[in-house]
Image (cartoon, helix red, strand yellow):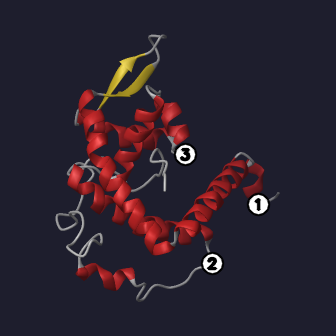
Amino acid sequence: MEWDEAGGVGAAGGVAGTGGVAGDAGGADSAGKLGGAGRRGRAGGEGREPTECVCTALRMATRSVNRLYDRALAQAGLRVTGYAILSRLAAAGPLSVGELAGRLAMERTTCTREVAPLVSAGLVEIAPGTDRRRRLLQLTSLGERKHAEGRPAWERAQRLVAAEFGEVDIRDLLARLGRLLDSSERLGTREAVFDHDA
């Protein structure tokens, strides 16, 4: 199955050790599963309360999936947010912060914060655009190598999640999440929706 890697927004921090990856979260165990046996109790949903809140349910699922991808990408010294940024820049070429933020459905300030450790690590550089006032983000040669290094770990995480959840269900989920994102952003442009007097 082919996957589009240039997506996904996760936990803060793009580079392991900068945004922080737990010391015991290093990749896969000998059984071929991400993480160790000690984590399986939480994975079973013990003590988890069901919720009807769309936002809470999405955040719960996102935190759990983030942990899986972060563990997989830790072996390449990356976290899932950093890998998503590298993937976008690898696919699209140089982008402004605003353009990158738009493609990842991030706030501009959040995107700036997430890019900063990648710049500090020498994976992304800020280059002048055609307009001197315009600054573009682009991968360095080190960033290209780091992205290529992280790709197999990302693919493995994708396969494991798809095998556990079901490939057809994953495709359906991604399509539905895309529709939910579109709906949410349309609602976000209608400020009056949340006015008490509306």
Amino acid type, label 3? Ala
The residue tagged 1 is 196
- Compared with residue 87, is residue 135 higher up or lower down, i.e. above or below? above
Residue 38 position in % (x across, y down): 24, 82
Quarter occupied by residue 110: top left
Horizontally, residue 108 falls left or right of residue 19, namely right
For residue 9, say whether it is visible.
Answer: yes
Tell me, for residue 52, which label it has, or none: 2
Q: CA distance from mark 3 to mark 1?
A: 27 Å
Rendering coords of residue 98 (x, y %): 51, 32
**For the view shown, which residue lies furthest in the front direction?**
1
Which of the two labelled residues, at mark 3 and mark 2, occupies the earlier sequence position?
2
Identity of the amino acid at label 2?
Answer: Glu
Tell me, yes or no, whether the two marked residues, 3 and 1, touch with CB atoms within 8 Å. no
N-terminal label among 2 and 1: 2
> Reading the chain from its start, which is encountered first: label 3 or label 1?
3
* Label 2 neighbour load within 10 Å: few <14, some 14-19, many 20+: few
Query: Amino acid type of disc 1?
Result: His
User: Circle 3 sits on which residue?
Assistant: 105
Nearest to the eye among marks 2 and 1: give it: 2
Q: Are marks 2 and 1 in contact (CB under 8 Å)?
A: no
Quadrant of the image for the C terminus? bottom right
Q: CA distance from mark 3 to mark 2?
A: 24 Å
